[in-house]
Image (spheres, helix red, strand yellow):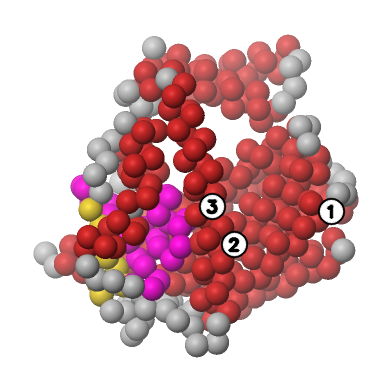
Amino acid sequence: MNSFSIALLIIGVTFDLFGCIGLIRLPDIYNRLQSATKCVTLGTCSILLSLFIHYGFTPVGIKALIAIPLLFFAATVGAHALSRGSYIYGIKMTDKTIRDDYKKEFKK
Amino acid sequence: MKYITLFICMLLLWLLLTFNLHSANIIIGIVASLVVMMLFGNKFFKDWQKFYNPLRYLWGIVYLIFFIWECLKANFDVAYRVLSPKMPIKPGILKVKCTLKSDIAKTFLANSITMTPGTITVDVIDNHLFVHWIYVSSQDPNVYTKKIAGRFEKLLKKVFE
Amino acid sequence: MINILLYVLIFLSFVCFIRILFGPSMADRMVAIDIFGTLVVGICVLLVYKTGRLFLIDIAIAWILLSFIGTITLAKYLTRKKLDE
């Protein structure tokens, strides 16, 4: 293994760690989704990129490269659907919230 | 013509995913792409001419580089907020106006906003995006619209419209 | 080296399980399940390095798609509509 792919692996696992710390520490579901989508998705993308650098243009490397945009769209669309669903379900935001424009759309 | 564009896209994706050029593999790819074309052809984009314009791909690459840079900034921003002991968060949901017209451009704008520092798109209603921001730094509509959506809109207009 | 990173990722999956067990509401559990699906992809890639079996990357791609469909279905269920709408 070359050192660049090892560095990408370590960076990816570190960002996964930050994302999971955020999952435990942050106060409500919307903030947890923030740390979840950004840190964990980017960390896993970095791990996949290290696989591509290690194997080069072989079937495995190309598959790892294709998995990156798939993971991106899966994570972002999933986060969007989850946040909208939990708002409609009626989960309250945390006390630190200072502004909520979305509430007016549901006062029918 | 719409159907043929979808067929070419699917065949290219299949060849990338399997990555060998045996004749059996190519025949399977053609049959699978034909089935997909028959089933979902009428749900494909209406403006298929945009696929054959090489300038759009060039702007797409510029957009991709800009987007990866923003993603890296987003990571460090969220990591800082998670790790600092006082947790400097000030969340809120804001209403952001967007000037893009086509659906695919709006989809990409929402996805980009989800991946940039501290923002996540909750809903899209007509021309307004509802964005959850982890640290609301200003409540003036002009300022936060420029801060959240303005960076991407110029590039996305060149790529998709 | 690979072993340590693998242990870290498995530990993180257990952290997700804590959120699944004690999450105050249903949506919190769903977020944890979503993250767990992403972590399993990372575990698959590290297993490719460790064992050298190349088919594991196919499992990773299939896992991404299945976890995406699962998340969308659960989110749709949260909005209390029928699933075929």
- Judging by the rendered image, the residue that carries numbered circle 1 is A3
Residue B119: within the magenta? yes
Q: Is residue A103 above or below residue A95?
A: above
Q: In terms of image quadrants, where is residue B14?
A: top right
Q: Would residue B89 be found to the left or right of residue B147 on screen?
A: right
Residue hosting label 3? B69
Q: Residue furthest bottom?
A: B86
- The quarter of the image holding the N terminus of chain B is top left
Tell me the kind of residue under disc 3: Trp
Occupied quadrant, residue C50:
bottom right
Labels 2 and 3 within one chain: no
Amino acid carrying label 1: it is Ser
Q: In percent of the image, x 33 and y 85: which residue is there?
A: A95
x and y percentages locating residue B109 in the rendered image: 37, 47
Discs 1 and 2 lie in a common subunit: yes
Count neighbours of disc 1 (C-alpha within 10 A) and say few if under 14, some if 14 to 19, many if 20 or more: few
Q: Is residue C17 left or right of residue A105?
A: right
The residue stretch that appears in magenta: B110-136
Q: Position of residue B31 (x, y in %)?
A: 58, 16
For mark 1, name the chain: A
Q: Residues within 10 Å of mark 3 (few under 14, many from 20)?
A: few
Mark 3 vs mark 1: same chain?
no
Which of the 4 quarters of the picture holds residue B89?
Answer: bottom left
Q: Amino acid at mark 2?
A: Val
